[in-house]
Amino acid sequence: MPRITVTVDGVKYEEDVEPRLLLVHLLRERLGRTGTPVGCDTSNCGACTIMLDGKSAKSCSVLAVQADGCDILTIEGLSEGGRMHPMQRAFHEEHALQCGYCTPGMVMAAIDLLREDPDPSEETIRHGLEGNLCRCTGYCNIVRAVRRGAQEMGQAVNTP
Amino acid sequence: MTIQEIGRPRKRKEDAKLLTGRTQWTDNLARPGLLHVMFLRSPMAHARITRVDVSGARDLPGVVAAFSGQDLAAEQGSLPCAWPVTEDIVIPDHPPMAVSEVRYVGEAVACVIATDRYRAADALEAIDIEYEQLPAVLDMNEALAPDSPKVHESGNQAYSVKINSGDIEAAFRDAPVVVDRTYIQQRLIPSAMEPRAVLADTDGESFTLWSSTQIPHVLRVMLAVVTGIPEHRLRVIAPDVGGGFGSKLQVTAEEVLCLLLTRRLGRPVKWTESRSEGNLTVHHGRDQIQHVRLAADADGRIRGLRVSLLADMGAYLMLLTPGVPTLGGPMFNAIYKMDAYEFACTGVFTTKMPTDAYRGAGRPEATFGIERTIDELAAELGMDPVELRKRNWIRHEEFPYTTVSGLTYDSGNYEAATERAMSLFGYDKLRAEQVDRRDRGDPVQLGIGVSTYTEMCGLAPSRWLGEANFGAGGWEHASVRMLPTGKVEVITGSSPHGQGHVTSWSQIAADALGVPFDDITVLHGDTAVAHKGMDTYGSRSLVIGGMAVLKACDKVKEKARKLAAHALECSPDDLEFEAGAFKVRGTDSQKTIQELAFAAFTAHDLPEGMEPRLDSDVTFDPENYSFPHGTHLCAMEVDTETGMVKIRSYVAVDDIGKVINPLIVEGQLHGGIAQGIAQALYEEAVYDADGNLLTTTMADYLLPSAADLPSFVLDRTESPATSNPLGVKGVGEAGTIASTPAVVNAIVDALRPLGVRDVQMPCSPERVWRALQAARQGTREGAGR
């Protein structure tokens, strides 16, 4: 079995994995990082979205062996010092979650979206989140939350 | 003076754990020695199982056991149907795992229990199974023909019901206008984002089942009956549940089987479905053929309505399968006055996944049928569809009003909601633009769709359910416990899965007890904690469960009043309760309810006969349904060259009575409207001619993404419900019920001058384009049936 080294939310792991093991199953079932859920088996829903070396990736579509040597950030590692990331706070403020199952992936995808466009329009947000499905919110408040998160993250960057 | 919590847009208490991944989805849970279950599922729509051999699977590494339906036949029982709508209904035996015959693609035929899910999946491949194919039964009309192959020995009709009110023959005799339409309510897949998961464990005597369910309490009773495990030795827990929309209002084969497997093996077992497995085997929704006839006078006054439904049950009757279409029975007449009404419904067996409750359950179908037909009648009469509705709806001064189908609507103001919606929408301006585009022959036409819905919510008064032959009551339970430090535990029998009960119930309790919002916790979803309950469905949680919380708080307050009178040495009648404190009228002397909680705990000085506790345990059973209503308007741009449709604006003005938390209400409406639009434009469960489901993945079954939906403009009017002291009506299903007809009406409205009279849902560009082509060629082919 191949041995891989991954860093997940700041902790380094060495694991022997079957070549077919999905990254999301490594996270959930081997490393106990159950904050990242699985919503489908065709990479359509995006619930399992994480950051792989700083870019969003659907962890159900990545083999654990492909993540060898990578730095992984999940929803569980997003808060710093007990304080939620501005995007997490924005989702709370704008009531952008109901059942919350899509939320980890949605938040990660939203943060990634801002990497390319720090001040996205409604249309950019809607198209940017096309790969993340939500069944509860009708997306209205998610769009508002991403706008709000963008503003707050922009301010955070600009404030020394 | 404390701030009133009811009506405040409180941010949700639920959010923090969901936003940081500290969740308890069933699939997140593990037990020492956990085994994983996987099911082998039928690839045939209808077949006899001629041979099963699971020994090849048993021999593989990591496999602990493998069973066929035959192996479990003696103990697996039959999945329950709790709603036999008629005396002579046919309820076929429904083994959780097929033993000798399969009747839909996806039905479980064998299972493997292994040390991890990868090994279990491998082992499924080693099961040897042979089938003898039998004819599939897919079309409801064909299924009812005398020479049709049979799904069950008893035939393909499950039941037939008819409701009559007034003289329907007279209403249609010599009617100047009769509109006669047939609509297809396509089959839908509810698609909660969290796939189902079940974990079962035993200590050898008692059993615990964790399930992603809406109904832990109902499930416990039903599982006890099906498996023979005594009810008092079975605990059911619904941990965090990621959406339901009716799909988790079920007693599933997998729940029964996991319980049986843990009983057999003496070890914990877990099953988590894949999405494709879920699309095949989570009960589907809708699937009706609706024949609707509306008779009217020349001035548009409705004389009578005749509705005849064929409802696809699928292969078996599950928990509420037969009842769902009959919920439309008292709803097709909607907000309109008429002389006579007739409703007939036949439940039909086919070799497909069973149908059951899906957001709205029977009421969206009814609302679609009537609201589409009202628009058709308006077109027939050359009248504005809003004007036609005004001529027929119940006027606000006529409430309470008993409808032709026998329901008494307690309150409402259709005029107010409609006026507000039209103003926000810019109705007249859009109508003018529509005329202009028509005159110009613009390739992009504009349509305006109207939907003035009502629904019966708050399911339901127990006595009504008894009359409908429903297998349970409609009450809800709540307990309120004041803890020694003055904090409050609210225990609810309602079982949330995204609705925000914890926040809303805290608001109700905060106002009733005068304690801070943050001093309240709400417990739910575990039958060992919330020992009684009827769970969450049918927009019932707030209307019934929220009321139970209020009643439980009032009861605690009355106990506290006696204790306060004792402590303050006065009569209980001399006390007034304000901002969480009992005050002796006209003095400064007072005790807060939180102080009294400590006094009750120490019990050093209690009034004669008082027990040392400030808590209560109540149920609430409503006297009537509640009737939210509203006016939804959709402006749709339709490209007549490509068939592409685009929602230009969507306005919804809803009257859901008093609002506890406007933020949560808005969220429910957003999501509900989106789901209704999804039925109108995107979603359909498609079976091929052999009965194979083609839409088994999210790549095939089109759930709308953010890019497929617009923002919605929302507002509310408020006619408080008179049937409960909170004045609330329920909001969980309203958006879904209202929006589907608004969207389809808008598309048809855009294309009516081009000869299109209907477009079958989902109104894909291809369907719209075909409807246009057919209209141009003077045929109705492609326009839907």
Image: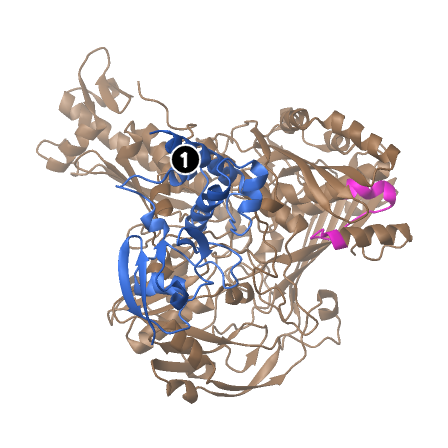
Q: Quadrant of the N terminus of chain B?
A: top left
- Looking at the image, residue A115 sits to the left or right of residue B205; the answer is right
Q: Is residue B724 above or below residue B151?
A: above
Residue furthest right as drawn: B778
Mark 1, residues whose alpha carbon is within 10 Å: few (<14), some, or many (≥20)? some
Q: Position of residue B169 (x, y in %)?
A: 81, 47
State the residue in front, B712 or A7.
A7
- The answer to whether residue B261 is seen in the rendering is yes
Task: Give the amino acid at mark 1.
Answer: Met
Residue furthest left as drawn: B604
Chain (brown): B
- Residue A18: image quadrant is bottom left
Chain (blue): A
Q: Quadrant of the C terminus of chain B?
A: bottom right
State the residue in front, B270 or B620.
B270
State the residue in front, B507 or A35.
A35
Q: Which residues are magenta?
A: B748-766
The colour scheme used to paint the residues is by chain
Q: Position of residue B433 (x, y in %)?
A: 79, 29
- Looking at the image, residue B571 sits to the left or right of residue B750; the answer is left
Question: Is B229 colored magenta in this rendering?
Answer: no
Q: Which residue is mark 1?
A: A153
